Amino acid sequence: MTPLVFNADDFGLSPSVNRSIAECARAGLMKSASLFVTHSAAGDALSAATALAEPIGLGLHFCLTSGRAVSPPGAIPLLVGPDGRFRHGFLSLARLLASRRRDEAARQIRLEFDAQLARFGELLPPALKGAVDHIDSHQHIHVFPPITSLLADAARRGGLTLRVPSEPVVSAGRLFRPPLLFHAKGYAKKRILDHFLAKSRRSENFGLSPVYFGIVDSGRMNISAVRAILGALSAGGIAAGNRPIEINLHPWKTAGEENLVPEEASAADRAFARSHRREEEYNLLTKHAPQIRAEMSDLGICASRFNEPG
């Protein structure tokens, strides 16, 4: 059986998100989640994970664009304001790393990465220590070479799976699903990520990293999107070989800005929360879970964690 990992990002964003991800895990299709430690609801997320009858895989969701830094603000002034909140989005972080301050920025990013990794370990209760199996980043910021090396080194040291957000060239059936404008934006995002990732590939061997899906349909990984991916896999349009597959989601039963922590949420977080698509992803992983599992089984694909062979 080919392992397919439905992985939920943004665990720890808010108690509302945490409850939604826990409910998705109980439905049995989603068995993996990536944890923010830059948000105050991280501890609540781990309490929810501990209460699950079947453990899920956990990973650090390294972040430089949402919430508050773990490091003191004075130690990383290029990354945060005086209140410790991150000052950059994806593109402004890219500009910083292309500027004359890039070496100092890279040094400060290393400090904050080490701090988040340490906080992640401190927050994990003993019962979840063995559940850690992957590492990734918010908004895929680890496509930037100085950050790629940090996560790749941590993955090698810990025997963790590293997300490589390089989505395969996909079938026309995925491209021409409505709404077309949404998917045009998704393909534009893919081009940007591929541009930066090409530089990282020169210095890193990603080996058997999972085949990744979560860019073209980012934030809209509903039942239609997943069926299009499964269809491409069954038709041989996507070659997984002996690699696992990751489908990345952001499920939320009751999305909305009022369910965020205002002093921690970024502008991108608020925009993401306003979309009803969060609820479509939640429904995929709960209401539609039995149908998707059956369709996967017919194709020789099983729902998995990163450290579970097919």
Image: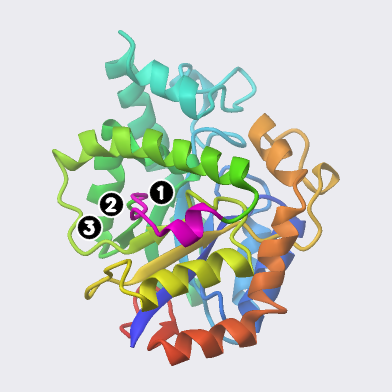
Compared to residue 272, the image places residue 254 above or below, namely below
Compared to residue 23, the image places residue 192 above or below, namely above
Q: CA distance from mark 2 to mark 1?
A: 9 Å
Number of residues whose C-alpha sits closer than 10 Å to that of mark 1, classed few (under 14), some (14–19) or many (20 or more) = some
Q: Which residues are magenta?
A: 165-176
The picture quadrant where one finds residue 224 is bottom right
**Which secondary structure, mark 3?**
helix
Give whichever of 161, 42 is nearer the camera: 161
Residue sitting at the far top:
100
Number of residues whose C-alpha sits closer than 10 Å to that of mark 2, classed few (under 14), some (14–19) or many (20 or more) = some
Quadrant where the image shows the N terminus:
bottom left
Q: Which mark is residue 117?
A: 1
Q: CA distance from mark 3 to mark 2?
A: 5 Å
Quadrant where the image shows the C terminus:
bottom left
Q: Are dots 2 and 1 in contact, CB under 8 Å?
A: yes
**Residue assigned mark 3:** 157
Q: Which mark is residue 154?
A: 2
**Which secondary structure, mark 1?**
helix
Q: Are dots 3 and 2 in contact, CB under 8 Å?
A: yes
Residue 52 seen in the figure? no
